[in-house]
Image (cartoon, rainbow, N blue to C red):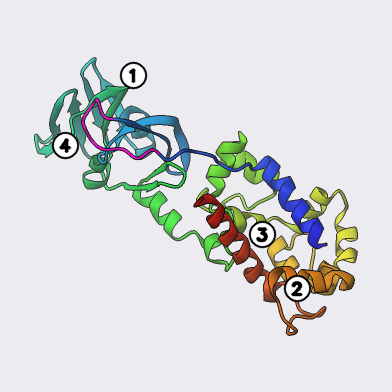
Amino acid sequence: MHREKILTMNIIKKKLPIILMAIITTQLLCASAQARYMNIYVNEQLIYRDMQTVGKFDMVPIKDIAGELGFKVSSTDITCTLIGQQNTYKFTLGDASVYDKYNNWYGLDVVPQIIDEKFMIPYNFLTKVLGASYTWEPSTNIIFINSDQAYYKTLHNPYNYMGYIDVSGRTLVQVANDSGYGLADLIAQYDLPADMPGSTSESAAYYNIPCKKIAEMYGMDFAALKEMLQWDNNITENTTWGVAEGETTLGAYVGKDSLGEFKKQYGFGDEVTAETKMKEVRNAMDQQSRDARIAEESK
C-alpha cells in the first residue's frame, strides 16, 4: 500500500504539475530597469500571467486589478481613474502625484508607466491607500494581492491548520492555474469542499479528498479499498483521506513483509510496529519529503 500511496500522489501530480518559474533579481532604475516576470493573483484569482514588473517598487497593472478590488475604471490615453463607492483616485502617466475626489494629494514612489501596453502603478499605493495586502513569493515569482476580506480568509484558512505538513510548498490556486483548471473546476474534480480557499496548501487539499474519490483514483470502489486497508465501519466513503489514512495500521498500509524496509527508509526504530497507525508516523514521513524538496530546490 505504501507503493500505492506513491502512485496516488503521482496521479495527482500529473494533473497538478509542479510550477516552474525562474527567479530574476532586479534593481529599480525606473522605466529602463531590468524586469521580473510575475503571475499576479488578486483575491485568489489569476489576473495576469508573466506580468513584467520593475524594481523594488513593483509595478502592477491597475486596470486589470481594480475590478477585483471593488473599483471601476475610467481612462484616457494618459490618465487612469479608479472610481469606488467612497472615493476616486486619478493617476497620470509620468506624474508621481495622485489626487482623490476631495483633492487630497498622494505621492507615488515611482511614476505611472506603460509596460507591455499596460497602465502600471507601484504596488504600495494599493497597500498604503487602498488597504489591500500584497505578498510576493520569491520562490515562485507570484504576487498575491488581497482586499481586507480576502486577506482575512487567507490568513485564517482552517484547512492549513489541520496539522498536515506542507510538502510541496504550493497552494491550491497555484496548482489549479498550472494544471490549466479554474480553481472551482479543480475543487469539483477532486470532490473537495466547495468553500476551500485557493490559499490551501496542496498537501492539506490532498488529505481532504474523500475516500470514495481516492478509491476511484486507485481504479477500485470504496468497498475494495476499505477491505484492503482493513478499516472498521467508522470510515465511510465520505471520510477524508487524511482521517482514513491516519487510522490505517502500518501492517495494512505497507504489509508486514515490507515493514522492515519501510522503517529503514524513514529511520524508524523498534517503537514502530505493524500495529502503529499512520497518523503516528505520517508527519515524520511528510517532513522528510518536504526537507528533500527544499534541499533539491536550493541546488
10 Å crowding of disc 1: few (<14), some (14-19), many (20+): few
Q: Residue at x 45, y 47 (%)?
A: 139
Q: Give the residue at mark 3.
A: 207
Q: Position of residue 179 (x, y in %)?
A: 62, 37
Q: Give the residue at mark 1.
A: 117
Q: Position of residue 138 (x, y in %)?
A: 41, 46
Q: Amino acid at mark 3?
A: Tyr
Q: Position of residue 218 (x, y in %)?
A: 83, 51
Q: Secondary structure at mark 2?
A: helix
Mark 2 and mark 4 in contact? Answer it, CB < 8 Å. Answer: no
Q: Seen in the image, is 180 located left or right of residue 253?
A: left
Q: Amino acid at mark 2?
A: Lys
Mark 1 and mark 4 in contact? Answer it, CB < 8 Å. Answer: no
Which mark, residue 108? 4
User: Where is residue 248, by image quadrant?
Assistant: bottom right
Q: Position of residue 12 (x, y in %)?
A: 70, 47
Q: Decide which of 109, 213 is in the foreground and name it.
A: 109
